Image: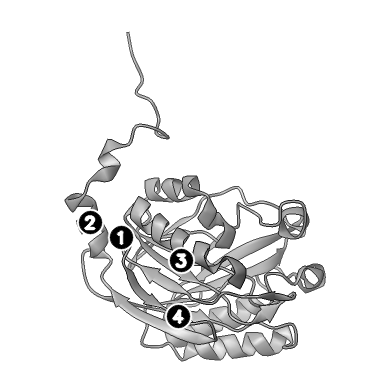
Amino acid sequence: MDGGSVRASLIQLAVSDHEPPAERRARAAALVRAQDTSDLVILPELWPLGGFAYDAWSDGAEPLDGPTAEAMSAAAKAAGVWLHAGSIVERDPDGPIYNTSLLFAPDGELAHTYRKIHRFGFDSGEAVVMGAGQEIVAATTELGTLGLATCYDLRFPELFRALLDAGAELLVVPAAWPERRREHWTLLARARAVEEQAFVLACNTAGTHGGVEQAGHSIVVDPWGRVLAEAGSGEEVLTVDFDPAEVAKARVEFPVHRDRLLGIPAPVQRA
């Protein structure tokens, strides 16, 4: 993008085990429709069922044209925004369930999906129940190129370096990050912004689900690692205006990526 302000709204949705998914879906759609002065709207990870509500995942999994996608498509179109609708438990008819992010264009079209690559839980939960994504996703939009990642992915800098190589300027990270590791959340969001010289827009859940208190504190960080906006611990909509052209400017003023030596293809020697 050559310049101009972008308004992003991160909907830090409260997720609990007591609110039926259908009611939360309708509530989330209403919140999205209300952001009609924004350009980009972001929801958290696995908000329809809960990021730690493992027992609900199998029965609540849905296809890419299921009720959540239908509601989010209509909300994106009504608001006229790019909508990163967080992620759902995707039911693949030919495979396992996946933690899949949905990106809708302002006309309501499902433009991109991203299956979470790094699954949390070690020997339980997501790491055991869900399949791992295989594809890196960088989505070209008029707002800039969006690099898609999800929650636990924040701990793996090699993914974000691959997104940088794919042209990412805005790194969008929905999450269900727990309160007990909140310091890691803000630290890693700032680190990924500094490393890639990109904006990080990280949208977390509030509330408690699966017995796990959520950290909230959704955050927007600029390419220099400065926090432009940060939410509190409860449900709220965090809105911030920023200029994506600052990415190119930072990369010119401090061209650190020019000095990369590792993790890039070696030059081919020809006789």
Q: Nearer the viewer, mark 4 or mark 1?
A: 4
Of the numbered discs 2 and 1, the one sitting upstream in the chain is 1
Residue 96 appears left or right of 266: right
2 and 1 marks in contact (CB < 8 Å): yes
Q: Which residue is mark 4?
A: 231
Find disc 2 in the rendering and name its residue: 250
Measure the alpha-carbon separation of dots 3 and 2. Answer: 21 Å
Question: What is the secondary structure assignment of the residue under circle 2?
Answer: helix
Q: Which residue is mark 1?
A: 223
Q: Disc 4 to disc 1, how far (Cα)?
A: 19 Å
Whether the residues at callouts 3 and 1 have beta carbons within 8 Å, the answer is no
Q: Is residue 178 visible?
A: no
Q: Amino acid at mark 4?
A: Ala
The answer to whether mark 4 and mark 3 are in CB contact below 8 A is: no
Closer to viewer: mark 3 or mark 1:
3
Marks 4 and 3, how far apart at CA: 11 Å
Which element is circle 4 on?
loop
Q: Earlier in the sequence, mark 3 or mark 1?
A: 3
Q: Are marks 4 and 2 in contact (CB under 8 Å)?
A: no
- Per the image, label 3 sits on a secondary structure element best described as helix
| Up-down relation of residue 10 to residue 24 (above or below) | above
Query: What residue would you read off at disc 3?
Result: 186
| For residue 209, above or below residue 101 | below
Question: Residue 116 in the image: x percent, y percent?
Answer: 60, 57
